[in-house]
Amino acid sequence: MIRIAIVGTGGMANGHAAAFAQIRGCKVVAACDLIAERANAFAERHGIPHVYSDVDELLADEECDAVSNVTSDSGHAPVSLKAIGMGKHVLCEKPLATNYPDARKMAAAAARAHVINMVNLSYRNASAIQRAHDLIERGDIGRVMHVEASYLQSWLASPYWGEWRKSPGLLWRLSTAHGSMGVLGDIGVHILDFASYAAGDIRSVNCRLKTFAKAKGNRIGQYKLDANDSAVMTVEFANGAIGTIHTTRWATGHKNSLLLRVYGDKGAVVVDLDSSYSELRICRGKNIDAQQWSVLKCRRTPTVYQRFIKSIRAGVNDQPDFVRGAAIQKALDACFQSDAEGRAVEI
């Protein structure tokens, strides 16, 4: 039995607990949160026997094999490094850290400790992106020339997700003082991974970030609303392709939309998660002249949670690991530098 401790019991932690509950041979044995009341309520909801409000106490006293790190962004590095130091396998929420040096330190520490390490880039769970990666890597659409990718949410424009002005769980995501890297760090990390996993590594980025006024004095209670709301990037890939990647929380009508278009000199692939997680569209061969698209059904792929548990059992680290998380963090850092300096930045 693989015993897991969940550190951080906010909204996303419910997904971790539910996912692990569906996997045979593992059990969530402990929950930890700085807010004891929240940790207790979470543990009761998911039938978790042990509760802590101090991660050092948990790591010293709890018999667990792995830690699922679901703290806020600023907690990812310190909590993960403590867990690694105690020989625990770690699944960490994204972004891996709040800067590349910390992310690189996490990857190096995990490698030295020989522990399984993965970052929860959850849209890798879509079999369509896995198939797109395989097709492009195999050369089915030829040389990649142009890429278009977007991740759109509407929770600043719509109460569908909840009333953000009254929700600490959403407000902290708008405040750098509360550990947020804005929309770029929250969901931009996903679309950067999504695009580069399929189309290839990114060589350089030219990014513009924007924070819009949302309240009087741009503050609500303890939350200064200074984290970015929208990000637009023009990128060059290592293979020579160019493209655009953008993300925002102001996309009216989009609950949670990820779209990727990759154009090669011998075809094109489209992954649209609003349409399907398990199908993609492709234009190649005779369909190119006819301007027609075919739908490919994709085999089911294991979730990141399943990959994590399987990796622990096998002793072989699956993807996406901390090295990958650090590479995406390096791209995020380049985006912030590009916006600050008003120029393209090499990664």
Image (cartoon, rainbow, N blue to C red):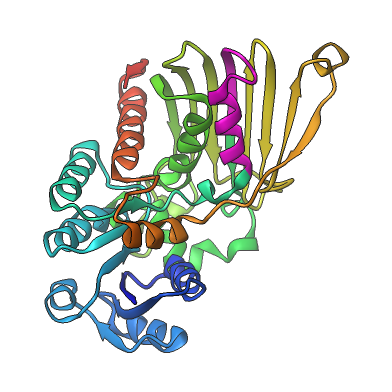
On whether residue 217 falls in the magenta region, the answer is no
Front position in the image: 107 or 131:
131
Percent position of residue 216, x then y: 45, 53
Percent position of residue 154, x then y: 61, 50
- Residue extent of the magenta highlight: 128-149
Q: Residue furthest front?
A: 314
Q: Is residue 280 left or right of residue 335?
A: right
Front position in the image: 226 or 75:
75
317 relative to 83, above or below: above
Q: Is residue 39 left or right of residue 169?
A: left
Q: Residue furthest right?
A: 290
Residue sitting at 28 percent across and 55 percent down? 116
Residue sitting at 45 percent across and 55 percent down? 304
- Tally the numbered discs: 0
178 relative to 332, above or below: below
Q: Quadrant of the N terminus?
A: bottom left
Residue sitting at 28 percent across and 87 percent down? 50
Would you say residue 153 is visible in this rendering?
yes
Front position in the image: 273 or 181:
273
Q: Quadrant of the C terminus?
A: top left
68 relative to 31, above or below: above
Percent position of residue 7, x then y: 29, 70
Would you say residue 220 is visible in this rendering?
no
Residue sitting at 61 percent across and 37 percent down? 131
